[in-house]
Amino acid sequence: MASTAPGSSTVRACDLRYGMRIITPNGHLGTVLDAVLDDTHLRIFVALEDGDESSIYARVGETFHVRAAAIKVRAVCQFCACTSRWHETRDGRADLWEGVGRGWSVAPYPPAHAHRWGPHGDLWTCPKCEREGTIGKRPGAWEGTERKAAA
């Protein structure tokens, strides 16, 4: 069985559903197409990432690692509300190194932390506000105004 990867959880074979992304026992990533009960075993049909199809026999109580679906997120500047480019992530948080873009800075907070003016989690500052400086600017002051897209 493959080790638990970030962004994955464990699901029993009998709970697998169409479209779930699983890590097969031999370590390949695939998408569940169908599952059929054969006596005491479950036959799971999987479309592998390389384009091949495979079938796996599993006991009904056996567990599989299921990958979380990638979602698209973007950072929002805490001072002017401009937004970064969209990028895919598995944990629902914008990533400074892999997706936000050059010049953005982040003040990391736990995802559940609520700030006074409404947002949760990390606080982002866009390149323009970073260059101009944030002295005298108040986070969340843009509330109620239309958000601007980053250039």
Image (cartoon, rainbow, N blue to C red):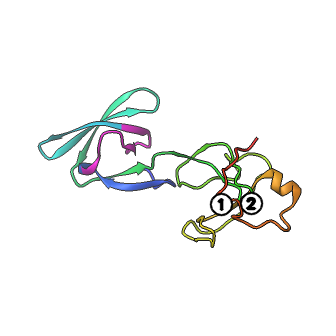
Residue 34 in the image: state x and y as whole percent.
Answer: 26, 36
Q: Which mark is residue 102?
A: none
Q: Residues within 10 Å of mark 2 (few under 14, many from 20)?
A: many
Task: Left or right? Give the position of 140 relative to 30.
Answer: right
- What's the residue type where badge 2 is placed? Phe
Closer to us: 92 or 146? 146
How many marks overall?
Answer: 2
Task: Left or right? Give the position of 46 relative to 111.
Answer: left
The residue that mark 2 highlights is 79
Locate the C terminus and report the quarter of the image it occupies: top right
Q: Which residues are magenta?
A: 15-31
Residue farthest along the front direction in this orientation:
144
Residue 134 in the image: state x and y as whole percent.
Answer: 83, 63
Which one is closest to the eye, mark 2 or mark 1? Answer: 1
Q: Helix, strand or loop at disc 1?
A: loop
- Is 80 drawn above or below residue 101 in the view shown? below
Q: Helix, strand or loop at disc 2?
A: loop
Q: Residue at x 50, y 45 (%)?
A: 70
The mark that comes first in sequence, 2 or 1, is: 2
The residue that mark 1 highlights is 143
Which quadrant would residue 136 be assigned to in this image? Answer: bottom right
- Is 81 inside the magenta-drawn segment? no
Task: Left or right? Give the position of 8 relative to 129.
Answer: left
Q: Residue at x 43, y 50 (%)?
A: 2
Closer to us: 52 or 31? 31
Q: Residue at x 64, y 58 (%)?
A: 144
- What's the residue type where badge 1 is placed? Glu
Residue farthest along the right direction in this orientation:
132
Residue 78 in the image: state x and y as whole percent.
Answer: 71, 60
Does residue 8 show up? yes
